[in-house]
Image (tube, rainbow, N blue to C red):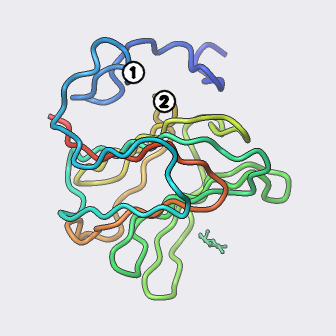
Amino acid sequence: MPNAPTAPGWPGHPGQPLWPGQGQIPGQPGWPSQNPPYVAPSGSLSVPYSLDLPNGIYDKMLITINGQVTLNAKMFTVDFLKGNDIAFHFNPRFNEAGNQVIVRNHKAGDRWGKEERAIQTMFPFMRGAPFEMKILCTSNDFKVAINNVQILEFKHRVPELSKINRISVYNDVILTSVRAETLP
Ligand code: GAL
């Protein structure tokens, strides 16, 4: 299976840019000096965690989340919020009737939309394991990569990107950092 990603370690993509405008693995030489992140907390963040995005989201905005799945995790969640609505709900579940699945959806008012469940790779998370999640916003979709491998895209269902102004992370995850920046 030469193309199948395996966790952890992600062989096969050393030093290659993930997306256009993106550099290499953070912390390695070659990571470009992008526009300075306007939020760059570090150390352990308390969960539930919330980050305001004063300008909403926009094309080429990159969110990087470093964290670790708890040892006994049932699930964790990353939501992009527009007020009380959820523009993008990203919800890895570690045991849904014995299966691991990443459920994506949106919620308007009290109504959930249609779930998306297929991914382009194997389930990339492991209980107890650290991960890096990158969410690239484009004008069409969110692109999500875990450990530098893209796993899925989620087409925008809430079109007013500038009003998607908060990220919330919760459930069974330890958070090290969350940062937002703009790719060149
Ligand atoms: C529901 C669950 C919500 C949310 C939603 C996504 O079953 O209760 O928290 O994950 O699925 O479609």
Residue furthest out toward the right: 98
Residue 102 percent across, percent down from the top left: 62, 52
**Dot 2 alpha-carbon crowd within 10 angstroms: few under 14, some 14 to 19, many 20 or more:** many
Residue 17 percent across, percent down from the top left: 33, 21
Residue 28 percent across, percent down from the top left: 37, 15
Task: Name the residue rendered at 60%, 19% in the picture.
Answer: 9
Indicate the quadrant where residue 103 lies. bottom right
Task: Name the residue rendered at 69%, 55% in the picture.
Answer: 93
Residue 3, numbered circle: none
- According to the picture, the residue beneath numbered tag 2 turns out to be 149
Q: Classify residue 173 as left or right of residue 44.
A: right
Q: How many marks?
A: 2
Q: Secondary structure at mark 2?
A: strand
- According to the picture, the residue beneath numbered tag 1 turns out to be 25
Residue 97 percent across, percent down from the top left: 84, 59
Q: Secondary structure at mark 1?
A: loop
Q: Amino acid at mark 1?
A: Ile
* Residues at marks 2 and 1, CA–CA distance in whole angstroms: 11 Å
